[in-house]
Amino acid sequence: MVRRGKREFVCGVHASLAALGRGPERVKGLLVAPSRHGAPRVQAMELAESKGIKIDEFPAETLNELAGTRQHQGLVVEVSPTPVLDIDALLEGQPPNRPPILILDGIQDPRNLGAILRTAAALGAGGA
């Protein structure tokens, strides 16, 4: 996710397809480089069309600027800003029958993360 002022973008094939799958309640539009060809472009455009999401073509240079990288693979999705909750609002919004939520910050070792997630899952932690 990349923020440009009040706008947020998701870039790359897999991230774009995942965002498009969420539908128009979260996605504002699909931005495609005309130089992008192949199955991922077709799949992204078909998914956007099926959900009534606006599709625009922009030069790769424009997508580079919006995505903050050249690694966007010719697909960038503009999404609605992610709501930010403080911890109290997050906890208040959880129904009593939901499992506990695991909140992590600054994890750098993937083995440590895996161990934490396996332990948390065994104890019934979740989140959505």
Image: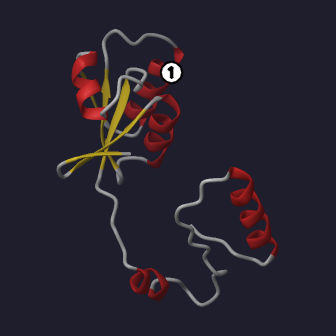
Disc 1 packing (10 Å; few <14; some 14–19; many ≥20): some
Considering depth in this image, is 3 or 108 the residue closer to the camera? 108
Q: Look at the image and name its color scheme.
A: secondary structure
Q: Quadrant of the C terminus?
A: bottom right
The amino acid type, in three-letter code, at marker 1 is Pro
Q: Residue furthest left?
A: 5
Image height of 126 relative to 63, above or below: below
Residue 57 on image: x %, y %: 25, 20
Q: Residue furthest right?
A: 122
Q: Say whether residue 11 is visible.
A: yes
Residue 61 on image: x %, y %: 24, 18
Considering depth in this image, is 126 or 67 the residue closer to the camera? 67
Q: Is residue 93 left or right of residue 3?
A: right
Considering depth in this image, is 117 or 28 the residue closer to the camera? 117
Q: Is residue 53 left or right of residue 122?
A: left
Q: Which residue is mark 1?
A: 40
Q: Say whether residue 56 is visible.
A: no
Residue 67 on image: x %, y %: 31, 33
Image height of 118 relative to 22, above or below: below
Residue 21 on image: x %, y %: 49, 43
Residue shown at the point (74%, 72%) measured from the top left: 120
Q: Is residue 58 left or right of residue 91?
A: left
Q: Quadrant of residue 31?
A: top left
Q: Quadrant of residue 68?
A: top left
Considering depth in this image, is 59 or 86 the residue closer to the camera? 86
Element under label 1? helix
Q: Is residue 77 left or right of residue 112?
A: left
Residue shown at the point (35%, 37%) measured from the top left: 77
Residue shown at the point (45%, 88%) measured from the top left: 92
Q: Quadrant of the N terminus?
A: top left
